[in-house]
Amino acid sequence: MMGNIDPRIIAQATGDTLVMLGASLGLSVVLGLLLGLVLFTTSPGQLLAHRAINAVASFGVNVLRSLPFIILLIVMLPLTVVLAGTSLGVAGAIPPLVVGAAPFYARLVETALREVDRGVIEATQAMGGSTWQIVIRVLLPEALPGLVAGATVTAIALVGYTAMAGVVGAGGLGDLAIRFGYQRFQTDVMAVTVVMLLIIVQIFQWLGDRWVLQLSHR
């Protein structure tokens, strides 16, 4: 039976989820890329090797990655109110989503950068390339397929995070599943929200895989 399904509510919840995903993914990629560059360039033997900075950055990333997202949501409630003006709805979900996903992506960025051929970096240094030029013209272009693949993995993780954010009234499909599917025992609503989340995941995975394939064949 699908008598509890209201297409308008499903469409609204799907739209809210996509907004949360778009905003949080964009911010997470930017912050995670910067943090990943810090982790890589300050590690031993790299361009800006600095033990203290690397240790602090690595510790911060590890702490944030070790926190279960549901706990992070609750712990960040006061800060979320300061940053977004509310802890509810789409706006209230974005700060914890970014804090949860950016460190995750930063480690993927670090891994992608480590796979860049060391010889290419050394050749650019031998030609007098500055650190900035090496990062912009060598590291990032060479690691681009890995960076896109990491962003795809992060996007899929964020789909799960947005569903969990429904626990604190963040809106979207997760909130719909909890309020109607779980609390009101409307299994048809729960089923539809699960299907919609699966579709979103498949779309992100498909787009990411195609982009990585195109970049890998350049």
Image (tube, rainbow, N blue to C red):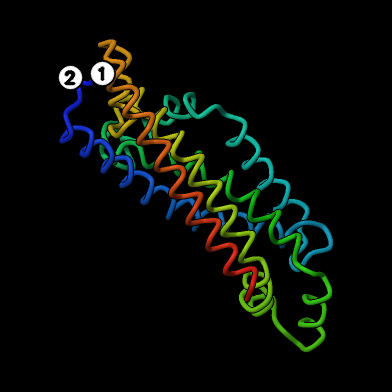
**Residue at the front extreme?**
1
Residue 97 occupies quadrant:
top left
Q: Which mark is residue 119?
A: none
Residue at image x 62%, y 63%? 145
Q: Residue 146: x, y in percent? A: 64, 59
Residue type (three-letter) at the residue carrying disc 1: Phe
The quarter in which the C terminus is drawn is bottom right
Q: Is residue 122 left or right of residue 175?
A: right
Q: In the picture shown, does residue 166 fall above or below 137?
A: above
Sequence-earlier tag: 1 or 2: 2
Using residue 172 as the reference point, say whether residue 57 is left or right of it: right
Which circle, 1 or 2, is nearer the viewer? Answer: 2
On the image, the x and y values in percent for residue 168 come to 34, 24
Other-residue count near label 1 (Cα within 10 Å), few / some / many at <14 / 14–19 / ≥20: some
Image point 21% across, 38% down: which residue? 12
User: For mark 1, what is the residue?
Assistant: 180
Element type at marker 2?
A: loop
**Dot 2, crowdedness within 10 Å: few (<14), some or many (≥20)?**
few
Residue 120: % across, % down: 78, 77
Quarter holding the N terminus is top left
Q: In the rendered view, does 88 fall on the left or right side of 39?
A: left
What amino acid does circle 2 point to?
Answer: Gly
**Most foreground residue, 175 or 66:** 175
Towards the viewer: 176 or 186:
186
Q: How many marks?
A: 2
The residue sitting at 68% across, 40% down in the picture is 59
Which residue is denoted by mark 2 in the rendering?
3
**Local SS, label 1:** helix
Where 189 sits versus 41, above or below? above
